[in-house]
Amino acid sequence: MAEFYNTTRIKGARLKDAKKRAKSQDEIVLGVFVESPYSWLTSEEIHDAAFTAKTPLTSVRRSLTHLSKLGLIDKSKSAIRDSSYGAACHSWRLSEIGRSPTERVMRLMPTWAPPSNPTPVQSEIGA
């Protein structure tokens, strides 16, 4: 579940839409890491790779915080680079846990569970 910080106390349909956008952004950010699992990336690099100027950089940073809390990405203590604003900027990369497709699903959708007795595929049924 995406973490949305409702600091403006919106309600109803607007809140539902904001939570949906946050979830989508988390999935997009995680997708960037899945494509480059061993690369350290800054929030600006992720924003430039996957979003338009319409998406605030703070939304990418919110996703990074949420994905870090889920254990899917790691924040570097040493891979710090200068941002386009000249300030120091942290980097993240896909965590060991985040490299597992099953773990990604389990952490992003905690109510999902793999089937205990999966339906056999046609080749296992026999002709």
Image (spheres, grey):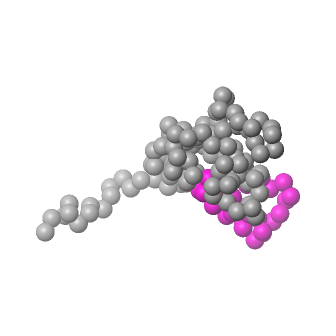
Residue 46 in the image: state x and y as whole percent: 65, 50
Q: Is residue 126 above or below residue 66?
A: below
Asked if residue 109 lies left or right of residue 16, the reply is: left
Would residue 2 be seen by someone viewing this image from the given angle? no
How many numbered marks does the figure carry? 0
Quadrant in the picture for residue 78: top right
User: Which residue does the image show at 56% across and 48% down from the upper left?
Assistant: 33
Would residue 45 be seen by someone viewing this image from the given angle? yes
User: Which residue does the image show at 67% across and 43% down from the upper left?
Assistant: 42
In the image, 88 versus 72, the foreground residue is 88
User: Which residue does the image show at 69% across and 46% down from the upper left?
Assistant: 43
Q: Residue furthest bottom?
A: 13
Quadrant in the picture for residue 69: top right
Residue 21 in the image: state x and y as whole percent: 69, 63
User: Which residue does the image show at 60% across and 57% down from the upper left?
Assistant: 28
In the image, 101 versus 31, the foreground residue is 31
Residue 61 in the image: state x and y as whole percent: 72, 48
Q: Residue furthest top?
A: 78
Magenta-tinted stretch = 1-29
Residue 23 is a magenta residue: yes
In the image, 90 versus 10, the foreground residue is 90
Q: Report the quarter where the C terminus lies.
A: bottom left
Q: Report the quarter where the N terminus lies.
A: bottom right
Q: Residue furthest right?
A: 8
Residue 106 is a magenta residue: no
Asked if residue 85 lies left or right of residue 112, the reply is: right
Secondary structure character of the magenta stretch overall:
helix
